[in-house]
Amino acid sequence: MTGVARALENRALFEGYGVLKLLRTDHAPTTLGLLGEHLAGNVRTRTAADLYDLLTADLEELRFHGLDLPRTAQQYCASWVSQGFLTRRAAREERTEEFALTEEAHGALRVIDQLHTPRDAVTRSRLALLTERLAALARDTDPDAAGRLDALRTERDRLEEQIATVLELGADPLPPAQALEAAEELYSLAIDVPSDFTRVRGELERLHRRLRLDLVEHEGSQGEILEQLFLGVDAIEDSEAGRSFAAFHSMLIDPIQESRFHEAVDALASRPFVARFGRERILYLQSYLSRLQRESHQVRHAMIDLSRSLREFVRSRQFEEFRALADRLRRPQRIGLEIAPHVRPHMKLGVALTLSTFTPRSIGQLRLLVPSDVTAEDDFAPAAAGAVLDLEALRATVRESEIDLAELTDAVDDVLTRRPSATIAEVLQEHPATQGLASIVGLLVLAHRHGERTPEAEDAAESVRWRVAGPGSAGSTADDGSPGLSRSARITSYRFTRPLREPSRD
């Protein structure tokens, strides 16, 4: 490859590789430091409120040290989502959002960690690990039975020789330097595994979006994906990422593997070289499987939710609405391509369109509202004095707009002074409805509050009658529907059994 080709390849890598793009953004050291502390340790996801609180305290302290960080935690999180540092999803158990690092952010943190703690280019443990894995791969992929047997016999002879040596001379542990080297190599492998969950989850979400897009944009019949879904084939779990994660998840929850892992870590915790290896790293390894299991369950739940969402998208026929919308959007594009050779882009067509939304305008066209411009400048002139205010006329005006409950209460109490109980119709016989239908409504309100409905009268009804006032219609009994007629209705039967007002204690 020539130098020019390598230069062009590197430019494409810097422009398209997410890790390098993140490392080149403004405030990348500060961003990765804050997010690495709160989202790359024991806790991999945080709710929006928790992350905002933690970042607000950190930003205040960084400003105290002289860093120019003018925005709020919420604004920085929104910016980091758009730049690719964070992913924002709906929380599964709470009605809120949660944040997590992206796959590219985990990669950028690994690059920084390697720069902080550089390792030797060649180590004995790395070479031994590589040799053992190559030998195991060559042995396991050999289709020749004779070759496989020879490799197994060689391994058996080596183990028998080691057993004899231990029986004769005792155990000879690795030197502390080599043990520390091997432990650090294994630890570097361990810290890379949790970030793989983010990559798997990202691949599953991209697969989910691609399947939805295929359902919407597929031409002709429903397509192969739709047929698979209706036949019960789960396209997400059957994908390469889904199968890989399912195999890892089943191994992770295997109790035998878990017991072997914890026994090995507990045994290493008692070795002399652990003092140089670091107690924090041992504690990390002791809680390693539980952390992986927690994150694995989260990815598993996410996979189930995506599969369920895709099946519901098909079964509810929502994809048909999206396909119709996509077709409506593509139709003008096709027409535009057809007329493009004949019509210029800026040609006036003479067609007026009424926009359904506001018309965007320049901010320079806005004018401030001055309240004095719309305030009346004329003084209020006193109105000419009219008729003398009459208290009775005022009461009559009030009675036209409100139900006179006081009058109706007095009417009910007056009837109850002469009989033990009374219905609404019996009250109206002695005290006609002076407000027409409003008096009937008022009596029903009072009966509902203070009256009783006997069981035998649960479905009973009674007739009530009132007059509609009108000029020149008093006493009219015509049936032409004109005002002033006597009206009647059937209402639910209530019975008043006690006075509505409390007796005076004078």
Image (tube, rainbow, N blue to C red):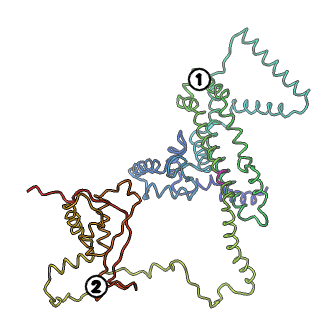
Residue visible at 31% across and 64% down in the picture: 445
Left or right relative to 419: residue 34? right
Name which residue type carries label 2: Ala
SS category of the residue bearing label 1: helix
Q: Exactly how many numbered labels are in the figure? A: 2
Give yes or no for residue 36 being in the magenta stretch: no
Left or right relative to 300: residue 148? right
Please give the range of residues in magenta.
306-310
Left or right relative to 480: residue 257? right
**Which residue does the numbered mark 1 point to in the structure image?**
266
Between discs 2 and 1, the one toward the N terminus: 1
SS category of the residue bearing label 2: loop
**In front: mark 2 or mark 1?**
2
Residue 194: give x, y in percent of width and height: 61, 40
Residue 45 occupies quadrant: top right
Pointer 2 local density, CA inside 10 Å: few below 14, some 14–19, many at least 20 = some
Residue placed most toward the observer, 263 or 176: 263
Quarter of the image with the C terminus is: bottom left
Pointer 1 local density, CA inside 10 Å: few below 14, some 14–19, many at least 20 = some
Residue 314: give x, y in percent of width and height: 69, 58
Residue placed most toward the observer, 270 or 419: 419
Q: Main secondary structure of the magenta part?
A: helix
Numbered badge on residue 474? 2
Quarter of the image with the N terminus is: bottom right
Residue 400, relative to residue 272: is it above or below? below
Residue placed most toward the observer, 155 or 240: 240
Name which residue type carries label 1: Asp
